Amino acid sequence: MKIAVFPGSFDPITIGHVELVRRAIPLFDKIIIAVGVNSQKKYLYTLEERIHQIADVFVQEPKIEVDKHEGLTALYCINKNAQYLLRGLRNASDFDYEKQLSQMNHIIGDGVETVFLISHPQYSHISSTLVREVIKGGGDASPFLP
């Protein structure tokens, strides 16, 4: 069984995340959307809210599982018997950062492979960080949210 983990804080999940997962569904038997927990980070939404938001988006998709995770993503992959990490690339900066992570995860994760999907142009400007700022500032973030 081909299992992929799509890790992130998803604070909040954006239409860019959703589009990436939908494109990846045919590639894997199961995709675990792993919502990260970092006690050092201040989130706009609680862990429960983030999990619920994601589960609502993919309620009709049997290949999608939503879970929380703490600690190293590579070790989470081992625990879930996942052979792949799914990551999106919006720009060259994402690539440089994600390349380093993928190499470390491959070693720590006992050979876990990172699969990169390049964002379609209409989603490449969207990030959870920017969407959070729109929400905090009282703007309409609905064009960026599922």
Image: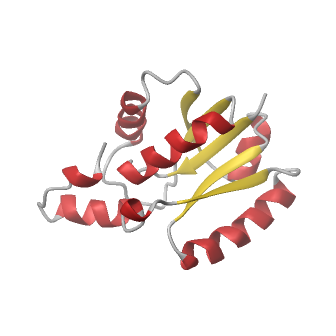
Residue 109 visible, this angle: yes
Q: Position of residue 142 (x, y in %)?
A: 20, 50
Residue pictured at 22% horizontal, 53% vertical: 143
Q: Position of residue 42 (x, y in %)?
A: 38, 59
Q: Position of residue 84 (x, y in %)?
A: 74, 46
Quarter assignment of residue 26: top right
In this image, 115 relative to 46: left or right? right
Residue at x 44%, y 21% (from the top left corner): 60
Res. 94 image quadrant = bottom right
55 vs 73, nearest the viewer = 55
Q: Quadrant of the N terminus?
A: top right
Q: In screen coordinates, is 29 left or right of 64? A: right
Between residues 102 and 35, which one lies in front from this camera angle?
A: 102
The x, y position of residue 87, in whole percent, is 60, 56
- Going 36% across and 49% down the picture, which residue do you hit? 15
Is residue 37 or residue 50 the one in the foreground? 50
Q: Is residue 35 visible?
A: no
Q: Residue at x 45, y 46 (%)?
A: 19
